[in-house]
Image: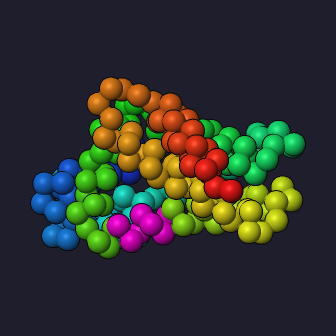
Amino acid sequence: MARWEPGARERLQKAALELFSSKGFEVTTAAEIAQTAGLTERTFFRHFSDKREVLFAGQDDFTRPFLVGVESAPAAATPLQVVVSAVLGAAGFFPAEKRPYSRMRQTVIVANPELQERELLKLASLASTLAAALRDRGVSEPAATLTAESGVTVFRVSFELWLADETGASIEDIERGVFRELGALTAMVE
């Protein structure tokens, strides 16, 4: 087995996703993932703490573009404008060529309640991080939390629509549409 070849992490992720899709998450072992990737089980555990983390590694990489969007929002922006900047700013994390991988990953997650829970925790962590960033900008509560949670909901709904989309629309275009929908709904509140 190859030991020190470059790209081991990516090979493990690809092998894991293929095995999770064909065999199921529960029955796939770390040893099988490593073997399929042409690596050792020890190499697997150098990159991932367990097989769930193959799907959820990189939380910081996922969160960073949202925070860059917060930082790039004008100082005078409203809390919602800041969150729109954050969500749209993270759209680059999901280019069109990543859609097939994201679809397969989501199919595996939807089929497993343990993974669904982990995905919800990832999104809850993102909402907490965005709320803290808003508070750092001087947004008080409950506005910071309410706005951050709304932004994460827009992202989640947009992501699901992007996965299902067959027209080739970008996630950013879909997010803009979902934000317009949210604006129309909140305009109805008196």
Q: Magenta: predominant secondary structure element?
A: helix
Q: Residue 19 location in percent, x, y?
A: 18, 56
First to last magenta residue range? 116-122
Report the residue that reaches farthest toward the left: 23
Viewer-nearest residue: 186 or 32: 186
Residue 48 in magenta? no
Residue 92 visible in the snapshot: no
100 versus 13 height, above or below = above
Q: Residue at x 74, y 69 (%)?
A: 142
Viewer-nearest residue: 6 or 143: 143
Q: Residue 38 location in percent, x, y?
A: 22, 51
Q: Report the side of 116 relative to 141 (left or right).
A: left
26 versus 173 height, above or below = below
Residue 134 visible in the snapshot: yes
Residue 120 in magenta? yes
Q: Report the side of 147 relative to 31 (left or right).
A: right
Q: Residue 186 location in percent, x, y?
A: 62, 51
Please name the colour scheme applied to the rendered image.
rainbow
98 versus 66 height, above or below = above
Q: Residue at x 39, y 39 (%)?
A: 162
- Would you identify the image quadrant in which residue 101 lies? top left
- Would you identify the image quadrant in which residue 130 lies? bottom right
Q: Residue at x 31, y 40 (%)?
A: 164
Q: Residue at x 77, y 40 (%)?
A: 73
Quarter of the picture holding the C terminus: bottom right
